[in-house]
Structure formats: C-alpha cells, structure tokens
Amino acid sequence: MLGLYFDIIDTAGHHYGPDAPETNAALGELDKLIAHLTSELAVLGQPANLVFVADHGMAATDPSRRIALDQIADPMDFRAIEDGPYAAIEPQPGRETALAAALLKPHANMECWRRANIPARLHYGRNPRVSSFLCLAKVGWIITTRPPEREMKPGGAHGWDPAAPEMAGLFMAHGPDIARGATVPAFDNIHVYPLMRRLAGLPPASGIDGDPAVLRHVTVKP
C-alpha cells in the first residue's frame, strides 16, 4: 500500500480562492500527475486499486467578512490560541466570567461555546488540551485578532462546520477490485479506513470509528 499527498490544489485554493482560474489550473496539473501515475502503472503491468480522497473542502474568504474578537471582548480578558474559521480562546487569570459574558451571547456570524458545551457532532472538546472557549464562524467569515494592517487578502480557507457543503471533500476509486459505475452518498472519511483494509486483503479491524458497511458495495466482492 502506498499513500501520496498532492498539495497544489490546497495551496492555490488558499492563495486565490476555490473558484479562481489559478485553482482550476492547479486542478489541471493534478489531473496530469494522476494520468502519469496510471500510465506508468500500466507500463509496469501492475494492477492497482486507486482511492482518491480529500481531507477537507474550501470556501472563499474576503477582508469584508472579518469578525474582530477585540471588538467583542476586552483584549485584556483573553488570549487567542488560534484564529481563523474558528478561534480557540483562553481567559486571562480571573477574567473568565467577563469573557464568557462577551463570547456566549448571540453573535451575527459566529457561535461560541465553553469546552464542555461544544456540540457532540463536532467530535471536539473531550481532550483537556482543547481551549476553554471555542468560537466557530459562519462559512466564509474569519475570526481574527490581527490588526488592520495585517488583514487577510481575498482567498480561501477551511475549518468551518464540517456539515457545510463547502467543507465536503471528494471520494473516487478505480481498479480491478472496484465495482464499475458504483456511486455512494456523502459519508465521513472515517469510513475509508475499513475499505482500505479490505482492498489490502486485511481482516476487518475492531474498535475503530469507521463502519465497513458504508463502502462495502463499491468493491467487486462485497
């Protein structure tokens, strides 16, 4: 089993946005790389099952869609561990109550939670290293503490609600053990692992999150 990662589309998407001509050009370059891979496998006479996945989607960003944390909460009350599509925030000593009052009230383009109240569907918040507060912006909006002179340029990002259509990835598979013309509804990437084990001839694994049944029908021998 061999794994390859191509970053050219992600890089272009961040720099130019998901719908930019430069990103479409990067997609064309990736297509050429995959064509080269398949042609070389054919020359070797090596049958291979190819599985293509993406770890996230991409949405366009713009400086006009900026949520300034220092305009919502007193900058003396917190430190931002991360910012962007989501923000990880820690209160300064003795300032948790004031910070909670500012963050947990309704906001137009983001929602914030204490660590213990992060929605279960996000599968985030159980580890003690997770910040005390998490804020998640609406798709296309960026949470930032950066001063205006360092504001972002138009481009693209990911890290918003994984249920948003813009955050969906892709799944394609081709090879002697893949059922020709099979389709599959949207699914979580955790279900790819059981498929990879089956294609590699390994027995099903126990104690994993992925469900072998989700992608069983995409193989010639379910």
Image: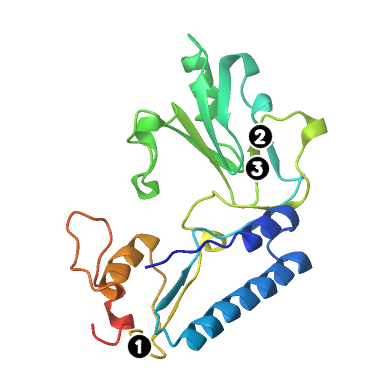
Q: Is residue 184 left or right of residue 17?
A: left
The outermost residue toward the right is 149
Classify 105 as above or below 3: above
Element at label 3: strand
Residue 62 is situated, as x and y percent measured from the top left of the image, at: 75, 49
Q: Amino acid at mark 1?
A: Ala
Q: Amino acid at mark 2?
A: Thr
**For residue 1, which quarter of the picture?**
bottom left
Q: Earlier in the sequence, mark 1 or mark 2?
A: 2
Marks 1,2: beta carbons within 8 A: no
Q: Is residue 98 left or right of residue 186?
A: right
Q: How is the image coloured?
A: rainbow
Q: How many marks?
A: 3
Classify 104 as above or below 97: below
| Crowd class of label 2 (few under 14; some 14 to 19; many from 20; radius 10 Å) | many
Q: Amino acid at mark 3?
A: Ile
